[in-house]
Amino acid sequence: MTEQQPHRFERGTDGPKVIVAGLDGSDSSMRAAAYAAGLARRQNAMLALVYVQPVMTAGAALGVPVSDATVEVAEDLVSEIRAATERFSDAWDMRWEFHTFRGDPYNGLVTAADELKADAVVVGASESAGHRFVGSVAVRLVKAGRWPVTVVP
């Protein structure tokens, strides 16, 4: 016969420590970032917001200043995040960082999650009809099976 220990309640000790949220400015990614922020706040985790700057060689060949445009998108995203953080700073006590990586969205998020030692990844659902055939970033992240992935509609 074994002696049973009384059940002790633990609060907030086993959750994720780093949550990566992919952000590209789309409505879906903004909802994913908000969801990830709430999760990070409740779990006392670090929220790493990640923007992947696309590498568009075709645009550069046509003389389009692609690098300048993607840097501007990243700066706009940081401004939006800072404004939202200031609005909720009294109610939310959470840690967050903003990171940019270069490449295609899938490989950029994989690199970010690896380098930041993510325990979870949160992304928005694809808004592109073509992803039904090719596969969205979210589906590819889930299939990679390296982290728990939450897909926010």
Image: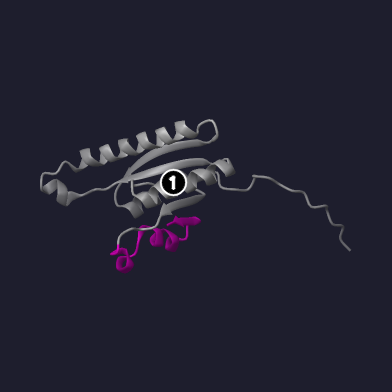
Which residues are drawn in magenta?
A: 129-153
- Position of residue 144 relative to residue 28, above or below, is below
Q: Could you say whether the residue bearing mark 1 is in a helix, strand or loop?
A: helix
Disc 1 target residue = 33
Q: For the view shown, which residue lies furthest in the bottom direction? A: 133
Coloring scheme used: one colour
The picture places residue 131, in percent across and down from the top left corner, at 31, 64
Check residue 136 for magenta coloring: yes
Residue nearest the viewer, comparing 148 with 92:
92
Rendered image quadrant of residue 86: top left
Check residue 133 for magenta coloring: yes
Q: For the view shown, which residue lies furthest in the right direction? A: 1
Residue nearest the viewer, comparing 95 with 79:
79
Q: What residue do we see at 38% from left, 39% from top? A: 99
- Position of residue 68 relative to residue 54, above or below, is above
Q: Residues within 10 Å of mark 1 (few under 14, many from 20)?
A: many
The picture places residue 96, in percent across and down from the top left corner, at 47, 37
Quarter containing the N terminus: bottom right
Quarter containing the C terminus: bottom left
The picture places residue 87, in percent across and down from the top left corner, at 46, 32
Q: What residue do we see at 56% from left, 47% from top? A: 16
Q: What residue do we see at 58% from left, 43% from top? A: 42
